[in-house]
Image (tube, rainbow, N blue to C red):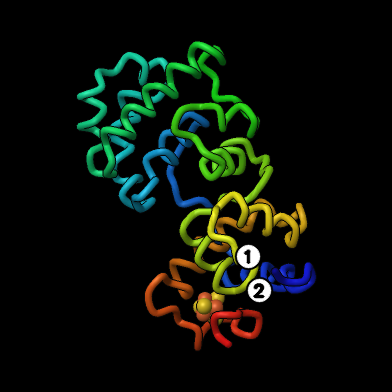
Amino acid sequence: MKKRNEAIEIIELLKKTYPDAKCSLDFTTPFEMLVSVMLSAQCTDERVNKTTPSIFCKYSTPQDFVDIDILELEQLIHPCGFYKTKAKHLKECAKKIVNDYNGVVPNSMEELVKLPGIGRKCANVIMLNAFNNPCGIAVDTHAKRISNRIGLSNNTDPNKIEEDLLKQIPEKYLKDVNHLLVYHGRNLCTAKAPKCDRCPLKKYCDYCF
Ligand code: SF4
């Protein structure tokens, strides 16, 4: 792990590099956010954004997802991959929201992680983007890779990486961290052939030494 002041410098540099970093999933309600983030597993946000308009124009509430025929839902979300598992989770999740939360997406980590198909990563994304109340850091493939490369965490388990990040990064940065790591992972710290020569984090990065 890094010293707290180094972690802050890293985040500040990323903020300067990506001043417009924000959520790239399209949504208008917490439930649409939940659907989009569930569809984004093993799929690009771009593809999710191309897929959801044709769903949300007809089906946009938890009750709609309870009522929709699973075969129709599978067909609608097919482009996002893993459509059978995702359709099953979406229907189970919608049912629990209707039955236990009166059709309203709960706004706490504790309740979100109890929903079918929602782990800490998705719950963190929902808390941040739908409720503007970040409680942790979503550790997706970019956050995992970059945290490991830089040396912010030596763990491989996303939950442990999140714990490490939370020890080093002050609360005021929680709203920015995931977006910044995603942008950095897409632009410079790519999975294959990272562009270290152009990276502002070079001097902090274990991968570069
Ligand atoms: S120096 Fe290279 S490996 Fe390290 S964060 Fe930058 S791009 Fe990634």
Identify the residue shown where x is 30% and y is 24%.
58
Please tell me the numbered disc located at residue 13. 2
> Which residue is identified by label 1?
153
Find residue 124 and report its horizontal and vertical position in percent. Answer: 59, 43
> Dividing the picture into quarters, in which one does residue 155 lie?
bottom right
Q: Compared with residue 118, is residue 180 higher up or lower down, i.e. above or below?
A: below
Callout 1: SS: loop
Q: Quadrant of the N terminus?
A: bottom right
Callout 2: SS: helix
Q: Compared with residue 27, is residue 17 higher up or lower down, i.e. above or below?
A: below
Please tell me the numbered disc located at residue 140. none
Find residue 127 and report its horizontal and vertical position in percent. Answer: 61, 38
In this rendered view, identify the residue nearer to me: 57 or 38: 38
Amino acid carrying mark 1 in the image: Ser
Crowdedness near tag 1: few (<14), some (14–19) or many (≥20) residues, C-alpha within 10 Å: many
Horizontal placement of 109 versus 73: left or right? right
Identify the residue shown where x is 56% and y is 15%.
101
Find residue 36 and report its horizontal and vertical position in percent. Answer: 41, 39
Q: Compared with residue 165, is residue 97 higher up or lower down, i.e. above or below?
A: above
Horizontal placement of 32 versus 11: left or right? left
